[in-house]
Image: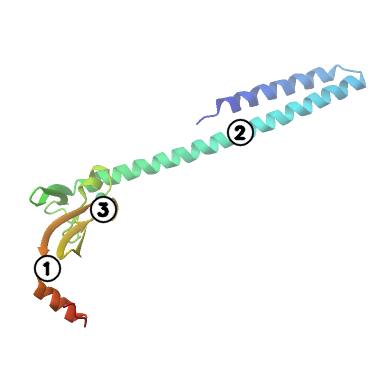
């Protein structure tokens, strides 16, 4: 934020310094000159402090402008990128964004997370399988927002479990 108080403080300190210096020109009394010199020194210190505060405020503004410019570039990039995708029903009642035909841009077919898309970012969904309680799930997961989409579930039969167990040289039964 612009520190108006710092700039205003700097201006009034410089004016006061100038006023004191002008007043000192006509003084012949040594004691009075010393008093004015101390007063002048205090005003110079105040002006330095205000100048530093104004400089810090300017540096903060420059950084804020840099951040906003970067955000604009990111938004423009996302606006271009999002046009490559369209909403697709990848399973009954399950939606993700998929590349539009002809918009693959050299990439293999993939899907991106609908939640992340709505939040203005691209996150490619990754296919994994997970087994839990005798059920094997085929999932698409988003590693950004942790969304999980179940594409299929299969109950593991005892015979396939035995095959899996023997494959690991272990007997479950
Ligand atoms: Zn996501």
The colour mode here is rainbow
Residue 53: mark in rendering? 2
Q: CA distance from mark 3 to mark 2?
A: 42 Å
Q: CA distance from mark 1 to mark 2?
A: 69 Å
38 or 93, which lies in front?
93
Nearer to us of marks 1 and 3 is 1
Residue, disc 3? 123
Q: Would you call the spot at circle 3 few (<14 residues within 10 Å), some (14-19), or many (20 or more)?
A: some
Q: Would you call the spot at circle 1 few (<14 residues within 10 Å), some (14-19), or many (20 or more)?
A: some
141 or 48, which lies in front?
141
Q: Is residue 95 above or below residue 105?
A: above
Q: Is residue 73 above or below residue 126?
A: above
Q: Position of residue 143 (x, y in %)?
A: 28, 56
Residue occupying the point 27% across, 46% down: 78
Nearer to us of marks 3 and 2 is 3
Find numbered disc 1 in the image and state the secondary structure of the residue it sits on: loop
Q: Is mark 1 within 8 Å of ligand 1?
A: no
Between discs 3 and 2, the one toward the N terminus: 2
Determine contact: label 1, label 3, CB under 8 Å: no
Q: Is mark 3 within 8 Å of ligand 1?
A: yes
Find numbered disc 3 in the image and state the secondary structure of the residue it sits on: loop
Left or right: 109 in relation to 52 = left
Q: Residue furthest left?
A: 92
Q: Position of residue 1 (x, y in %)?
A: 50, 31
Q: Position of residue 84 (x, y in %)?
A: 18, 49
Q: Position of residue 19 (x, y in %)?
A: 75, 19
Residue occupying the point 27% across, 44% down: 120
Residue 156: mark in rendering? 1
């Amino acid at each position: 934020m612009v520190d108006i108080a710092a700039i205003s403080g700097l201006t009034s300190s410089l004016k006061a310094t100038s006023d004191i210096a002008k007043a000192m020109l006509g003084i012949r009394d040594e004691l009075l000159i010393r008093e004015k010199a101390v007063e002048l020194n205090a005003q110079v210190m105040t002006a330095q402090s205000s100048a530093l505060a104004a400089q810090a405020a300017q540096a903060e503004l420059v950084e804020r402008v840099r951040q906003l410019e970067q955000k604009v570039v990111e938004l423009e990039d996302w606006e271009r990128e999002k046009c490559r995708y369209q909403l697709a029903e990848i399973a009954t009642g399950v939606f993700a964004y998929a590349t539009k035909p002809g918009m693959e841009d050299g990439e293999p077919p993939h899907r991106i997370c609908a939640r992340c898309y709505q939040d203005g970012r691209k996150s490619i969904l990754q296919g994994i399988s997970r087994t839990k309680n005798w059920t094997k799930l085929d999932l698409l997961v988003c590693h950004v927002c942790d969304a999980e989409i179940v594409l299929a579930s299969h109950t593991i039969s005892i015979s396939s479990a035995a095959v899996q167990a023997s494959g690991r040289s272990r007997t479950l039964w």
